[in-house]
Image: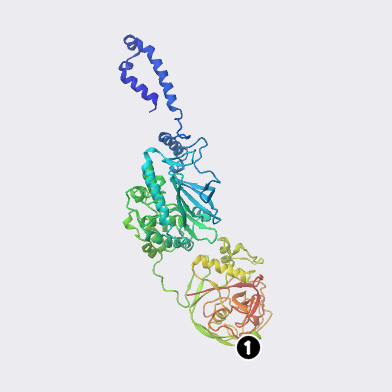
Amino acid sequence: MDFVEKFCVSIFFWFPALSLPGPALESQYPFLLWLIPKLVFMGKVMGIALALPKKKRNGVEPIGQSRLDKLIKRREKNNPNHRQEDIMPVYRDDEEKLELPLGYRLQKYELMHVLGSGGFGITYLGKDHNLNRPVAIKEYFPLNSAMRRTSDLSVVPQIKFRDKFEQWRKRFLDEARTLARFDHRHIIKVYDFFEAHNTGYIVMEYAEGEPLSAYLKRKGVLTESELKEILFPLLDGLKVVHGAKFLHRDIKPGNIVIRAEDGSPVLIDFGAARQAIGTISGSLSVILTPGYAPVEQYSTSGDQGPWTDIYALGAVCYRALTGAVPDDAIKRMIGDAPLVPIAERCAEDQASRGFLSAIDHALQVNKEDRPQTIGAWRAKLVPDKPHPPRPGETFKDCAEGPQMVVVPPGWFMMGSPSSEEGRYAAEGPQHRVEIGYRLAVGVYAVTFAEWDACVASGGCDGYRPSDAGWGRGRRPVINVSWDDAQAYVSWLSNKTGHSYRLLSESEWEYVARAGTVTPFHFGETISTSQANYDGNYMYGSGRKGVYREQTLPVGSFPPNAFGLYDVHGNVWEWTQDCWNGSYSGAPGDGSSWERGACSLRVLRGGSWLSEPRILRSAIRFRDTSVIRNVNNGFRVARRF
């Protein structure tokens, strides 16, 4: 009710006769006919005067709470999705500047840029002139209850919040003192903290990179393996924080940064002081983020603990896998919006059922129903590992990766006897090699489909090799160098969390022979019904066949005894080893030979344009590690 309304009510209270009909009023109170217009005029004048800006104090103009409420209502009408913290109810000067001026020096730190502001402070990008490095500087500035005084740039609390302001400024600096004890790669590092301008400042590592919120917007949804690369390092960091009896309180995609230098995640913007600001301002929107905050954060007396951060991190996982933020915890508690199980929103092969169940567990409304510690939740996320596949069993570590088969350990004689037809001197001397470990090997050479998946997800250096007009899909990838193959196994390792690599030369011959000692795993000879090569030539007692003059889709011919296809012909396969002209001094344990002419790397198996003698299990060839041509491909492996 404004002044004019109050004035009129008081007039009716003082003069009940004003409610009489017009003729009765004129006969009983004639003087009021003269007085009323004067009073109305005076009321309007006084109302206008009260609507004028209040007198400035210390050069600044206060904005009252009623005006803030009107701004909020107007914003809600125009944009129902706004956050209250977007409206900054503070004292302001004529230019409406809240931040310290750019270029300003705070001790040894120069302010370069405003990184952001929220309900309880402003964060600047600064430069440490002593150490010549960028830093992030957080200024304690509760925007709902304080002002910036233009005369000396001090932060001054409103009178009714003065005691609370002092109390929570101390807590802000105590928070910095606690965070400075942590030295963990995935927790933002605090370098310094101090008081100035009647407030507090925290100087932190500047984690240059991309907020997870922007990363998810760009990438869409993640797979389980991609999410684990972000989640598990954060769990390691939070375990340290919780061990110090400290909480984050505001975990969300915007408070996780993916470092530009190495793609590792770091947790920023701890919110211990944020709860205090909510107490001061009476505004819950500045201390929690709907969808990521559990019910206990909606009350200043809520029982918060590690389970509070676990809920928020579970919500981050839900968003990363589904593209949707979980419904607000309060709505879920009263039954208005029950949580859709994450498994119902994920693709079938996107994540394991156990992993998804652990995320649902973290998002339980009642805190007692959630994991109580990071360790307990991690045990749910990573259940006891199943027994690794047995020899002969196949598996895939990710949907886009190659199918693998486990080969048994064993030994063989590497190289060829001097009596073998078509033998080269580089195939000797024969020597015993023992593969004393279980090895998983690609069932097929890597295909164009698998390579293109690597490129589509940002790997393989973005290189898209030509298919020579023969088609892509299940044909083996060609026009790839040894260096290109290294880029692929690096991407596959990062994606799956397992150490993929090329086979060593001895491993390659061991799995190609699959227990045989003949020139081919088929026997003493070979035909074009068994492999893809130049059928104009014969080997041993074999016959001529067809010459297809191009690659064929992988798996076009029968496999060997270990379940591997196309180890003879179709494409040469890069191995890890450097080139040596003989086996003198070669390793006997299956490891790669990393000495010799390492600008040249070994290829095995022959290709679609080779004569049959070049397809023998013992044949060796070499080429420079950067060469790309139409008959070179590769196969991958990993040890258990």
Q: Quadrant of residue 166?
A: top left
**Residue 543 horizontal/vertical position (percent):** 65, 83
Left or right, 631 with reference to 194: right
Nearer the observer, 19 or 305:
305
531 w.r.t. 100: above or below: below
Badge 1 density bin: few <14, some 14–19, many ≥20, Cα 10 Å:
few
Nearer the observer, 51 or 570:
51
Left or right, 226 with reference to 335: right
The furthest residue to the right: 536
Secondary structure beneath dot 1 equals loop
**Residue 398 horizontal/vertical position (percent):** 49, 66
What's the residue type where badge 1 is placed? Glu
Q: Residue at x 46, y 30 (%)?
A: 53
Q: Quadrant of residue 374?
A: bottom left
16 w.r.t. 533: above or below: above
Left or right, 570 with reference to 242: right
Nearer the observer, 199 or 247:
199
Nearer the observer, 97 or 417:
97
**Residue 160 horizontal/vertical position (percent):** 37, 38
Q: How many marks?
A: 1
The residue pinned by badge 1 equals 420
**Residue 282 horizontal/vertical position (percent):** 37, 42
Q: Is residue 127 among the parts visible in the rendering?
A: yes
Query: Which quarter of the rendered picture does the N terminus lie within?
Result: top left
The furthest residue to the bottom: 419
